[in-house]
Amino acid sequence: MGDGMLKKLSIRKIMLSSLALFAMLLIYIIPANENTLDIKEELEYVNTNVESSPIFLMDQNSYMALTSVAVNDTNIENKAKQLIKVLTIGGMDSKIPSGFSAIIPPNTEVLSLSYEDGLIKVDFSKDLLDVSEDLEEKMVEAIVYTLTSIDGVDKVIIYVEGDILTKLPKTKINLPSTLDKTFGINKEFDLTSTKDITDVTIYYINQINDNYYYVPVTKYINDDRDKASIIIDELSSNFDFNKNLMSFLNDGTKLVSSTVKDGQMQLNFNEDILNDAVSEDISEETLEMISLSIGANYDVKEVVFNVDDRELYKIALE
């Protein structure tokens, strides 16, 4: 993942894959006494003729994982069509980073696609339903999460040959007619009761060769605490859901307090989150992992990391 630690006073873009032009999460780090800088002014090396868009592709462990691909159109409808083509087996395989794969069945066509007021309506050919039973729900997750990661898109309606897809034919899973990220992804159920169920999406880390990437897991648990506390507790514990998923958050890390105001999440930690108490460094992977998880559960534009009430890092979610 990049070239080492994120440094205070620096501005940089997270690289999720060596084959992606740049990642979907822009991170800038500033000390508490610095003004926020314009990320566009700092990234002079970025090719403005080609954008990178987040996409959720299947990794080698059959998780839908976050990576990014280059797209050459800023129009929302055209961008959505390109991303769906990348998600389709045999569609645009050359754009897929090594170690990932498409999930929509081959020969699936987009019969129509429209965008209006944050909603994408996409009508697929019946080939969409040729997906295997074990990948049926994952395919819907990939479509929904990819399309709603486009700036300005919040919801998706999936049609098949003109009819809204409201039930998956093989698994018999019922779908809401309008889908968004509350549908969940890589779902894990850890329930002791059918009452007071909380769903929280947490981003873990996996690795292909020397490149880290992020895997979101929507956990359904009986826990009435705020989601920020759940996220930190889950990431700081010994996670045994699957040995292929990692957390770089130090054991003993505690979230002392969290507040949301004016689109900003303020997180205040104990010193155990620090990799180095003298330099007050927090690992790059920890910053990214927590920021992605907060962004998945809260409508915020910025995450501020404090340790013992001292502001150390400020992360912009783009």
Image (spheres, rainbow, N blue to C red):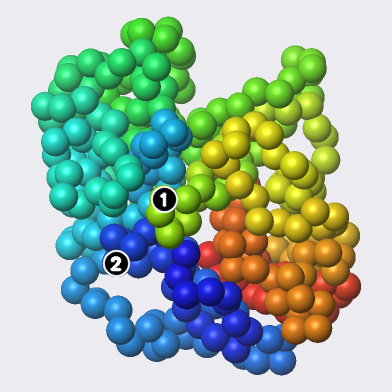
Q: Nearer the viewer, residue 166 or 184?
A: 184
Q: Secondary structure at mark 1?
A: strand
Q: Is residue 221 above or below residue 34?
A: above
Rendered residue at 37%/59% (across/down):
17
Q: Nearer the viewer, residue 176 or 218?
A: 218
Q: Position of residue 87 (x, y in %)?
A: 26, 39
Amino acid marked by disc 1: Ile
The tag on residue 84 is none
Amino acid marked by disc 2: Leu
Q: Quadrant of residue 158?
A: top left
Q: Is residue 182 above or below residue 177?
A: below
Kindly report the distance in space between the C-alpha atoms of the residues bearing marks 1 and 2: 17 Å
Q: Position of residue 116 (x, y in %)?
A: 31, 46
Q: Nearer the viewer, residue 150 or 286?
A: 286
Q: Position of residue 283 (x, y in %)?
A: 65, 68
Q: Which residue is mark 1?
A: 208
The tag on residue 21 is 2
Rendered residue at 60%/56% (across/down):
289
The tag earlier along the polypeptide, 1 or 2, is 2
Answer left or right for 60 relative to 159: right
Q: Quadrant of residue 59?
A: top left
Dot 1 surroundings within 10 Å: few (below 14), some, or many (20 or more)?
some
Q: Nearer the viewer, residue 313 or 125?
A: 313
